[in-house]
Image: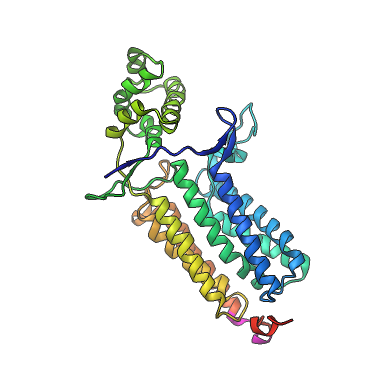
Amino acid sequence: MTWLHTLDPFAIQFTENFGIRWYGLAYLAGFVASYYFIRLLARRGLTPLPPEKVGDFVFAVAVGVVVGGRLGYCIFYNPNLFLQFTSSPPFWGALAMHQGGMASHGGILGLFLACLYFSRKEKLPLFALADLTTVGGSLGVFFGRLANFVNGELPGRPVSGNTSWAVKFPQEILNWPAQSPEKLADLAPAVTALGTSKEQWLELTTTPLSAADLHTIEPILQRVIASVQQGNLYLQSQLMPLLTARYPSQLYAALLEGLTIFVLMVILWCFARRPGVIAASYMFLYPTMRILSESYRLPDAHLGFQAWGLTRGQWLSVAMYGCALAVAYFVFRSSRDTSFNHKEHAHD
């Protein structure tokens, strides 16, 4: 049985385009969970970070993740955002985070730079701080991927065979003008129900589409999606047979990149003694899980599949293995005398 995605990206909506989104709440949940976990470790003497510095540390990491994640998306996935300017807030495409676009690889880099900054500022061991971010970071990824699913973004590839948990995302129609303009005519009954005449719609969607046509079509498609999310049963029935059944790749990513790594990081915390071992392990585990989960995810429409049939995210994950090796080298090159023994400090 295929499920039509009708979830609303707003937890609380004040106006048509303004409200509290699940995506923002997911980030907040990740940072709050990180704060309480790190505070627990600090109070038990399992980290050299003093309990009174936990709030400052989590704030620095939060800034690093958000800034790094956004810049990473702009650099790795959509550099054109640096050149987009509008007359309405936030005026610059690179700042338009409410429209989506965060890169986890950029967020990880920003997280590491935040640890480096805090380490130098507070005279604390860098690798011990990096270890602290792994459990909270994996929880953040878990919540973030769930929010991706709610938003209907980063959809999966078409299902192969009979998959009972396949999902149809109405956001798919936003790609039709560029990828499948011939499908737009099939939306005539849906857009007619929202006030656009059938004749006008068919005239707009006659190929080839002009720039003016695209400018007119997109808001109409957005209204169709919004109406589906608001429970319009007629529009849901009209879209259901037109959409492609896909893997819920966001949920796969939440389980693999988030929950699975979280469990493994907690287990590592029970055994690792040398600072940096946990961080290095995370940097091996995350790209492995990302490569696996992304094999079910549709690549970004403007990027497509790249060399050897891999996606941009998978190639960035391959590059991350090199960073993981570098971190592991520095960790095991350091003297054991400088390691932070959890048990020795547990009763300080």
The C terminus sits in image quarter: bottom right
Q: Is residue 315 left or right of residue 237?
A: right
Q: Nearer the viewer, residue 182 or 267?
A: 267
Q: Where residue 232 sits: x, y (%)?
A: 39, 27
Taking the spot 59% from the left edge, 53% from the top edge, the residue there is: 29
Residue 229 on the magenta span? no
The N terminus sits in image quarter: top left
Q: Residue furthest bottom?
A: 337
Q: Is residue 24 left or right of residue 317?
A: right
Taking the spot 58% from the left edge, 47% from the top edge, the residue there is: 25
Q: Is residue 328 left or right of residue 122?
A: left
The colour mode here is rainbow
Q: Quick check: can you spot residue 312?
A: yes
Q: Where residue 230 sits: x, y (%)?
A: 45, 31
Q: Image height check: is 267 above or below 91?
A: below
Q: Quick check: can you spot residue 207?
A: no
Q: Nearer the viewer, residue 317 or 137?
A: 137
Residue 335 on the magenta span? yes
Q: Where residue 99 sits: x, y (%)?
A: 54, 37
Taking the spot 57% from the left edge, 36% from the top edge, the residue there is: 12
Q: How many marks?
A: 0
Q: Where residue 236 sits: x, y (%)?
A: 34, 31
Tell me where the magenta segment starts and ends, as one range.
332-337
- Give the main secondary structure, helix, strand or loop, of the magenta stretch: helix
Taking the spot 38% from the left edge, 60% from the top edge, the residue there is: 292
Q: Nearer the viewer, residue 43 or 328?
A: 43
